[in-house]
Amino acid sequence: MRTGEGRLPRVSALAAGIVALGAGATLRGVEADVEGELHRRGDSVVLRVGETGEEFVLAPLTRKIQWHPRRKRLRRPSADERGAYRRLISRWKGEPRRVRIVGPVVESGAGQPMALEVRKFEWVRAPNGTAAPGRQP
């Protein structure tokens, strides 16, 4: 789902839209699968996405969106998922690099870019066809 400008809608706008439908449903969260390029922005690492230039501030995973129906609660992140952000940052050399990241999207303050919590990632092949150095173990 994208806005007219090709950007991901704010999570709060999606949640309000679902409530407005009047079906009794609510939005637990949004998980995105986003491919872009890593950049440093001040003290933060951001993922810059394609043609729109939209940026997500990357953050460690705090919770999963997936539901455990039998236990009637959110699924707990695995140790691998909890460590994905740390591994990504430790393997990144600080230069622009393509990567695919999957994780929950979290709103920041008004006018601030949304955060993308890193649940898993994989390096993306460079445009010249050379292999990206290794996938996340």
Image (spheres, grey):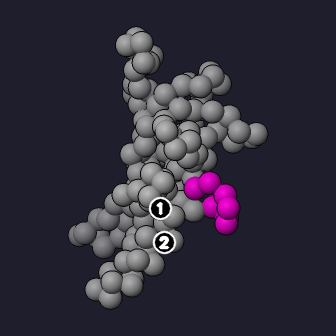
- For image coordinates 43% across by 70% down, the residue present is 14
Nearest the viewer among 69 and 131 is: 131
For mark 2, give the secondary structure. helix
Q: Nearer the viewer, residue 68 or 57?
A: 57
Q: Residue furthest front?
A: 4
Quadrant location of the C terminus in the rendered image: top left
**Principal SS element in the magenta part?**
loop
Residue 110 visible in this rendered orientation of the protein: yes
User: Measuring 52% from the left and 44% from the top, which residue is drawn there?
Assistant: 52
Question: Would you name the residue on which mark 2 appears?
Answer: 13
71, above or below 30, in the image: below
Q: Which residue is mark 1?
A: 9
Q: Amino acid at mark 2?
A: Ala
Under mark 1, the amino acid is Pro
Q: Secondary structure at mark 1?
A: loop
Percent of width and height locating residue 49? 50, 40
Identify the residue shown where x is 49% and y is 39%.
51
Q: CA distance from mark 2 to mark 1?
A: 7 Å
Q: Quadrant of residue 67?
A: bottom left
Contact check, label 2 and label 1, Cβ < 8 Å: yes
One can see residue 84 in this view: no
Task: Locate residue 99 relative to residue 45 in the image: left or right.
Answer: left
Q: Which residues, given as a range, are shown in magenta?
A: 108-114
